[in-house]
Image (cartoon, helix red, strand yellow):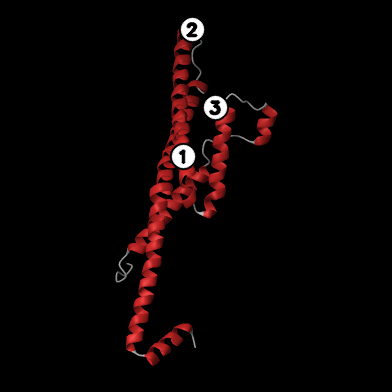
């Protein structure tokens, strides 16, 4: 006899009143468990994953913009054979420097976003999913290395730097992780908030 059949048997033996009481107790237990999950997911989205998504998505778009600028720079200033005339070269050089500075300005925006990401991680670490810890820890190390080795005054010797590996502004794997987690948690919340009588269609 299965557990469910046993419960039905006991309920039929003990009577309708007991069955109603048990049914109410089971419903309230399930409802409380669902509400706890709703509260947890809501807190995660409001204080951690939602804000992370805002900044990681912005970084992703800024990286795409920098990629377009780099491609345009190569096409305009590297691939083309400009006249060696002094005035032409001066104008081309000025335009090239402006393009580089524009790209650098967008990268500085990424760095500012990363400062905010670090703040979110420090304040919201208590709600992070355990399977996200390793990826988010990599970002923290990359950010610390950037502030120390690139933005700071401590420069590692070239061979040491190569041994440590390149410093990433933000790994694509982190951007994808945050994106997937936000979508999954939003979908789960919609599922939990769906009225019990509403059929999926």
Secondary structure under badge 1? helix
Q: Nearer the viewer, residue 117 or 31?
A: 31
Secondary structure under badge 3? loop
Q: Residue at x 56, y 32 (%)?
A: 146
Q: Report crowding for label 2: few under 14, some 14 to 19, many 20 or more residues within 10 A (C-alpha).
A: few
Q: Residue at x 34, y 81 (%)?
A: 21
Residue 2 position in % (x across, y down): 49, 85
Q: Residue at x 40, y 42 (%)?
A: 54
- Disc number lying in front (2 or 3): 3
Dot 2 and dot 1 residues touching (CB under 8 Å): no
Q: Which mark, residue 86?
A: 2
CA–CA distance in space, label 2 to label 3: 35 Å
- The count of marks equals 3
- Tell me which corner region of the image, top left, top right, bottom left or bottom right, holds residue 200: bottom left
CA–CA distance in space, label 2 to label 1: 50 Å
Q: Which mark, residue 119?
A: 1
Name of the residue lying farthest toward the top:
86
Dot 1 and dot 3 residues touching (CB under 8 Å): no
Q: Which mark, residue 151?
A: 3
Dot 2 and dot 3 residues touching (CB under 8 Å): no
Task: Tell which circle, 1 or 3, labels the residue nearer the N-terminal end.
Answer: 1
Q: Is residue 83 above or below residue 65?
A: above
Residue 55 position in % (x across, y down): 42, 40
Task: Tell which circle, 2 or 1, labels the residue nearer the N-terminal end.
Answer: 2
- Quadrant of the image containing the C terminus: bottom left
């Amino acid at each position: 006899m299965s557990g469910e059949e046993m419960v039905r048997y006991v309920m039929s033996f003990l009577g309708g009143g007991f069955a109603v009481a048990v049914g109410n107790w089971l419903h309230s237990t399930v409802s409380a468990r669902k509400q706890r999950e709703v509260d947890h997911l809501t807190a995660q989205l409001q204080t951690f994953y939602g804000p992370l998504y805002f900044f990681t998505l912005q970084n992703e778009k800024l990286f795409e913009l920098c990629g377009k600028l780099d491609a345009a720079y190569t096409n305009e200033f590297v691939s083309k054979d400009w006249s060696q005339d002094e005035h032409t070269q001066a104008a081309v050089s000025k335009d090239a420097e402006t393009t580089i500075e524009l790209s650098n300005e967008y990268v500085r925006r990424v760095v500012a976003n990363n400062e905010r990401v670090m703040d979110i991680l420090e304040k919201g670490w208590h709600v992070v999913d355990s399977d996200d810890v390793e990826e988010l820890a990599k970002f923290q190390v990359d950010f610390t290395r950037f502030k120390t080795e690139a933005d700071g005054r401590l420069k590692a010797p070239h061979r040491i730097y190569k041994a440590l590996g390149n410093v990433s502004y933000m790994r694509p794997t982190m951007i994808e992780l945050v994106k997937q987690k936000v979508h999954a948690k939003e979908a789960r919340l919609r599922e939990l908030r769906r009225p019990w009588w509403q059929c999926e269609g």
